Image: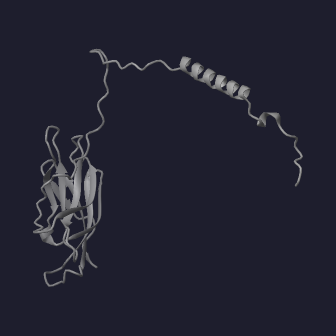
Amino acid sequence: MQQSVVPELAHTDTRPMHWLATATAVAGVVALTSLLQPGSAKAAQPTAGDETKPATAAAPPSTTGVDFPIDCGPVKEKVVKKATGDLDGDGRPETVVVVHCDSAMGTPPDGVYVLTQAADAARPRVVATLVDPKDRYTVTDFAVAAEAVTATMLGYSSDNVPSCCPDVKTSAKWQWDGHAFVRSTPAASHSV
């Protein structure tokens, strides 16, 4: 057996006096911390002369409970893309969504809808249809910026083109003109 180089330490043997000293030290720390507690918090109601800051900006409309103008038959509709922004400059954000039927097969066409919600309304509502699913477009790129909605869509040059193989790529931009969303085409349509 190898002997330790360090001599036996006296404090490694616990005796009742060690426990008493430890208990006294812990009790002292607890007593000291109870004396050094911070004061209680006080909430004051604003008085009539107080200047109050406006609440946070209005929340964008949710898609929950919205009746989208899309006929999906027995399957449910699915929101696949969503973006928000103040499109009409009124200080309240709108939500723009890309929706299609949640089909197990194929690529169902998309619809693009603008949602808004009045401050006193229980739920949001659709105020504009930018892309109708009946037009058979699939939205690939989508954004809301600078009070405009932009999208890149894949479509078909004729009804004879199979649904599997869109042959036209179209870019579009929509802006509110005070009465309706006006569509412009930033880039010409071209074949895929």
Which of 74/126 is in front?
A: 74
Residue 20 x/y as whole percent: 68, 25
* Residue under the image location 83 percent in, 37 percent down: 9
Picture quadrant of residue 56: top left
- Tell me if residue 162 comes above or below residue 124 in the rendering: below
Q: Residue furthest toward the front?
A: 16
Color theme of the render: one colour
Q: Is residue 22 left or right of residue 56?
A: right
* Quarter of the image with the C terminus in it: bottom left
The N terminus - image quarter: bottom right
Q: Position of residue 102 (x, y in %)?
A: 20, 68
Nearest the eye: 74 or 88: 74
**Residue appearing at x 30%, y 51% in the figure:** 146
Report x, y in % for residue 11.
78, 34
Residue 150 or 93: which is nearer the viewer? 93
State left or right for residue 98 relative to residue 30: left
To which quarter of the image does residue 51 belong?
top left
Q: Residue at x 54, y 20 (%)?
A: 34
